[in-house]
Amino acid sequence: MNVNHSATPPLAPELIEQFRKIVGERHAITDAADIEAYVTEERNLFHGRSPLVLRPGSTAEVAAICKLASEHKIALVPQGGNTGLVGGQTPHNGEVVVSLRRLDKIREIDTASNTMTCEAGVVLQIAQQKAAEMNRLFPLSLGAEGSCTIGGNLSTNAGGTAALAYGVAREMALGLEVVLADGRVLNVLSKLKKDNTGYNLHNLFIGAEGTLGIITAATLKLFPKPRSIETAFVGLKSPEAALKLLAIAQSEAANALTSFELLSEMAVDFSIRHGIDVRDPLAQKHAWYLLMELSSPGDDARTPLETILGLAMEDEIVDDAVIAANLTQRAGFWKLRDEMSSAQKPEGGSIKHDISVPVATVPAFIAEANEAVVKLIPGARPVPFGHLGDGNLHYNVSQPIGANTADYLARWHEMNAVVFAIVLRMGGSISAEHGIGVLKRDELPDVKDKTAIELMRQLKAMLDPLGIMNPGKVL
Ligand code: FAD
């Protein structure tokens, strides 16, 4: 996907040299072959270009980069794990990439305060593991957790599979350290749950997608590590049945219900056919599936899970279900879910919508959107799946069998318009968890409150008056 915005002037060799002095010879990359990994993303949907990738190793180095960049009006694109799905981390127009991956220290784990202070480049899975070693849980969890970073998670306000019980990334951050566009360091790292000393500044940078400053560290909340986790894979007839099961699960298990993932038959079928080592947990095919998980800080999540499934079977809400007998089987259920995005690739072009609607309207949304996309492109194959408990669906639509992929993808925004119209009518959001980046930038002014957009522009102008922080993204 090509993205055009105003041209960035070429970088003078003397300036490259000054940047090089800040990070050291090895960490200023100018070789085109080495830069490639920073300007493309996994799905190859976006491809950018950059004359220079900087890999700072400390907050002071990030601050020096920003100061120099602002003195010379050089545009910067912050990058973490490069797993973002909306083109926010890609230098579309020759900007300098600031990769935060070397800022990978866990500065402190405080088990009395239940906090972890870590640098922005810490990979999410490492943060989870370090918390677990201290008998705590850092609950943010998503398919890209082996490579995405805490800085990227906060900058996109990532959601993931445990948001139902623990909230999204924003709710897990108590404070941040941020380098501003002019090189000043804002230190609002804090372990405090209660701190009413004026404006909540750290929240401005969460979900800002690197357009207001560069996050260099965060203090994150930790939770008790569950002693018992039970996972079920369920077959049922419809999203309506899934909603009924959600109601039973929430009244029987309350906060112990940590994941509730709705999967369409086609999404499961693609994952089994194209995923690596993915198996169908159930003996027969079903129109819809659910992956549900209960986690309990006490000893027993099994009894409530069996009660929930028993009640649902009595009421004929559930057609079949299997509870993971061991950790390997549980990992197998999650593998099926985690392979779902990449398993769509071999089926050709896929037009994506990361939307949310009020939970109660999910079944109506699916029915209306399925009808609308097939009317727009006969033979298009809806592959909905996602976090039903949060009203968040990855409403992806694969190309008709045998269609030309480029022709299909050329209709990306046309299909978005049709789906987003339904989302907005239902009071939903066109970006539930992936952000705006460049992918949805042009749609944003049409769907967001005018005053909100005006305030966003004013904040951007105040914090980044030269427009060097991830230009052309979000706004
Ligand atoms: P990047 O991709 O490097 O950057 C993302 C954005 O954040 C860019 O705008 C970038 O400029 C900015 N940024 C990065 N680091 C910083 C920093 N330190 N300071 C300021 N700005 C910064 N997302 C979900 O929310 N839920 C999911 O369930 C989910 N599942 C996924 C599954 C797969 C297989 C993949 C590939 C992606 C998935 N994502 C999901 C999207 C993605 O993983 C998240 O958006 C993630 O939070 C991005 O982290 P990152 O470190 O890779 O950031």
Image (cartoon, rainbow, N blue to C red):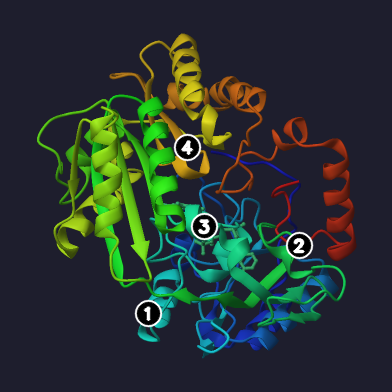
Residue occupying image coordinates x 29% and y 29%: 317
Q: Could you classify mark 3 by the number of other residues whose Cα lies within 10 Å: few (under 14), some (14-19), or many (20 or more)? A: many
User: Quadrant of residue 79 in the image?
Assistant: bottom right
Determine which residue is flagged by label 3.
39
Residue with the mark numbered 1: 132
**Could you tell me which secondary element the residue under label 4 belongs to?**
strand
Task: Choose the circle earlier in sequence order: 1 or 3.
Answer: 3
Q: Is mark 3 within 8 Å of ligand 1?
A: no
| Kind of element beneath mark 2 | helix
Of labels 1 and 3, the one closer to you: 1
Q: Three-letter amino acid code at disc 2?
A: Leu
Residue type, mark 3 in image:
Val
Residue annotated with mark 4: 393
> Vertical placement of 323 versus 297: above or below?
above
Label 2 crowd (10 A; few <14 / some 14-19 / many >=20): some
Single out the mark in the foreground, 3 or 4: 4
Dot 4 alpha-carbon crowd within 10 angstroms: few under 14, some 14 to 19, many 20 or more: many
